[in-house]
């Protein structure tokens, strides 16, 4: 008997891919939608970032996320893609709040970047002079604060002119040990905490009615001029700094590149840097808060430094 041929069906194997994700409850029901993995564009950065200014400002807006389009408003409203599109720096000549977003296809819209500008045209920085130790010092009012617009140059023990040169000293003032500035025992330069000797608005070697700035006073100054990122350029003098490091001295603070003296009694950084003391101590005892305006960056930074070093001093009116 002839048996019929057996035919085998050809089977096409289709790979099976398992997609696994967590189930979230939406209105009481499980959702099988995959989680969102979309990146978010970085928040736009305004330069300058805001603050009190006494002249018109050219505000640049940038974003570290490449390929973004920036939209902005100047009336304080939250921007959308229907707002003005940023192309060139924005001229701000009156008090206003700028807000900006960064948008890129395939990414979530950035958080809002904000800059609140107070423009006081006509020179709301007021300038005057104060007599102290046989010398006349220029002063400048920035916001609610009145500062000496020159480095202190009163001779006391443990203070020096740069390179011990009188000509340099007449221009840049003296460099002081921390304890000499405060008028407290020299032993406070070591690891002994002298917090009990430091008073609020500590006069130290400043004239009557003036005091040495605490770290918080420097913070107020930075806030008044729009923050750290551009403070260096705004406060530095228009000449004297090496290379292209001169500032614009917008407020008349005139931070000169006075250099400094380190603990081994060697001088450094004339024309490239300056450091101002504050009265604030740190947890390390032998170090003190300072405010720096070093050459190069447009910003500023704080630091902890040995109190036996010699730095510049500015006085602040009570």
Image (cartoon, helix red, strand yellow):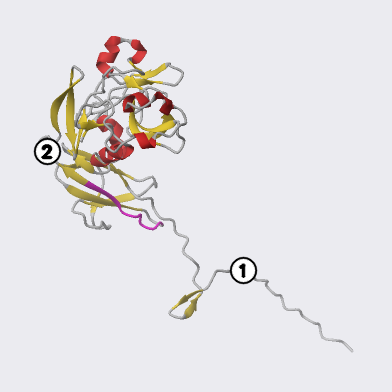
- Label 1–label 2 contact, CB within 8 A: no
Badge 1 is on which residue?
17
Instruction: Tell me residue 244's x, y (percent).
Output: 31, 23
Percent coordinates x, y for residue 26 in the rendering: 44, 77
What residue is rendered at 26% in x and 44% in y?
Answer: 87
10 Å neighbourhood of mark 1: few (<14), some, or many (≥20)?
Answer: few
12 horizontally vs 293: left or right: right
Residues rendered magenta in the picture: 107-116
Q: State whether residue 312 is above or below residue 33.
A: above
Instruction: Identify the secondary structure beneath mark 2.
Output: loop
Q: Residue at coordinates 13% horizontally, 29% vertically from top-left?
A: 127
**Overall secondary structure of the magenta section:** loop
Whichever of callouts 1 and 2 sits on the residue coming sooner in the sequence is 1
Q: Is mark 1 on a helix, strand or loop?
A: loop
Q: Along the line of sight, which residue is nearer the eye, 119 or 256?
A: 256
Neighbor class of circle 2 (other Cα within 10 Å; few <14, some 14-19, many 20+) is some
Q: Where is residue 300 in the image (x, y as percent from the top left)?
A: 34, 34
Q: Which residue lies furthest to the left in this view?
A: 122
Q: Which mark is residue 121?
A: 2
Q: Which of marks 1 and 2 is in front?
A: 2
């Amino acid at each position: 008997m002839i048996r019929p041929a057996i035919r085998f069906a050809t089977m096409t194997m289709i790979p099976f891919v398992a997609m696994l994700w967590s189930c979230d409850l939406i209105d009481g029901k499980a959702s099988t939608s995959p989680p969102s993995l979309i990146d978010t564009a970085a928040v736009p950065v305004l330069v300058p970032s805001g603050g009190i200014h006494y002249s018109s400002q050219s505000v640049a807006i940038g974003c570290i996320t490449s390929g973004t389009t920036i939209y902005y408003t100047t009336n304080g409203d939250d921007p959308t893609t229907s707002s003005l599109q940023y192309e060139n720096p924005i001229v701000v000549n009156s008090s206003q709040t700028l807000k900006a977003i960064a948008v890129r296809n395939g990414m979530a819209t950035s958080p809002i970047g904000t800059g609140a500008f107070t423009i006081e045209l006509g020179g709301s920085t007021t300038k005057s002079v104060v007599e102290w130790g046989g010398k006349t010092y220029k002063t400048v009012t920035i916001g609610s604060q009145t500062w000496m617009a020159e480095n202190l140059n009163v001779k006391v023990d443990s203070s020096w002119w740069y390179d011990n040169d009188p000509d340099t000293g007449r221009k840049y003032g003296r460099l002081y040990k921390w304890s000499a500035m405060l008028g407290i025992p020299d032993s406070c330069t070591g690891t002994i905490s002298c917090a009990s000797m430091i008073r609020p608005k500590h006069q130290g070697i400043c004239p009557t009615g003036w005091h040495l700035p605490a770290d918080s006073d420097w913070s107020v100054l930075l806030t008044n001029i729009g923050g750290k990122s551009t403070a260096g350029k705004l406060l530095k003098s228009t000449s004297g700094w090496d290379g292209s490091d001169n500032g614009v001295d917008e407020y008349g603070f005139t931070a000169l590149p006075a250099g400094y003296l380190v603990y081994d009694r060697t001088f450094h950084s004339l024309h490239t840097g300056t450091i101002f003391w504050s009265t604030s101590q740190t947890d390390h005892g032998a170090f003190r808060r300072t405010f720096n305006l070093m050459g190069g960056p447009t910003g500023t930074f704080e630091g902890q430094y040995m109190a036996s070093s010699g730095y510049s001093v500015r006085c602040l009116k009570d």
